[in-house]
Image (cartoon, rainbow, N blue to C red):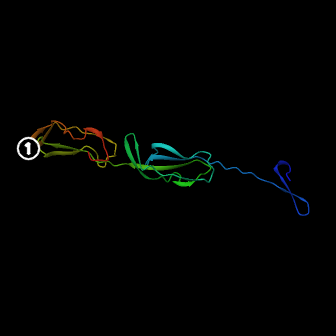
Amino acid sequence: EQGTMGISKLYHMDGSRVHIVKYIYKPKEGGKVEAKFVKSGTDQEISPSETIKADKTQVGIEYSTTPKPEIEHNGLKYVYKQVSASGAPQNGRVASDPQTVIFEYSPKIGKPVNAVSKIIGSNETILTESVTPKDPQSGSTYSSTPKPEIVHNGITYVFSSLLPNSAPQNGRVSDNEQ
């Protein structure tokens, strides 16, 4: 038998009435879980943040995310290093408050660029100079200006031109030899 206000009427064996109070629960809404991608040792974001779980997802629901192996930002390349200890864990559960998983990235090391000066009509190298620092970041710029004259073994040579299959004088460091 149904009584008022959603309270069911039940009866004991002796005929006396027992009231049962029914409570209704709804899911507790939690904070958003997002992933940020930053340059290691900084707060500089190198890729837009991504939502792992939307705001108001039920507290206690599991979440999991994985880092991007490589990110390109403003022409520079970065590789995944680690999950920051200052953020939320990579795998966890939605909490009442918002959580941020912070993935840290290091500069990706590219191949150094060298300027090689050769004598016209021979394969003899008379000068090799590095035009990038040691372990240059992939995507960083380099610039090379040929010397107007080079003295090699007492003989003077003047700049003539770039070889047809040469890397450009000004460009970006890549993952491949240039």
Q: Nearer the viewer, residue 5 or 38?
A: 5
The residue lying at 37 percent from left, 45 percent from top is 77
Three-letter residue code for mark 1: Gly
Residue 99 coordinates in the image, percent (x, y): 56, 49
Is 30 placed left or right of 155 in the picture? right
Q: In the displayed structure, would residue 120 be above or below residue 6?
A: above
Residue that protrudes farthest toward the front in the picture: 1
Residue 30 coordinates in the image, percent (x, y): 62, 48
Q: Nearer the viewer, residue 70 or 87?
A: 70
Residue 22 coordinates in the image, percent (x, y): 78, 53
Residue 87 coordinates in the image, percent (x, y): 52, 51
Is 70 placed left or right of 54 in the picture? left
Q: Which residue is mark 1?
A: 154
Residue that protrudes farthest toward the left in the picture: 154
Q: Nearer the viewer, residue 143 or 2?
A: 2
The residue lying at 50 percent from left, 44 percent from top is 49
For the C terminus, the image quarter is top left
Residue 121: quadrant of the picture: top left
| Disc 1 crowd, CA 10 A, few/some/many (<14, 14-19, 20+) | few
Is 82 placed left or right of 145 in the picture? right
Is 124 placed left or right of 59 in the picture? left
Residue 173: quadrant of the picture: top left
Q: Nearer the viewer, residue 10 or 51?
A: 10
Of helix, strand and loop, which one carries label 1? loop
Looking at the rendered structure, the number of numbered marks drawn on it comes to 1
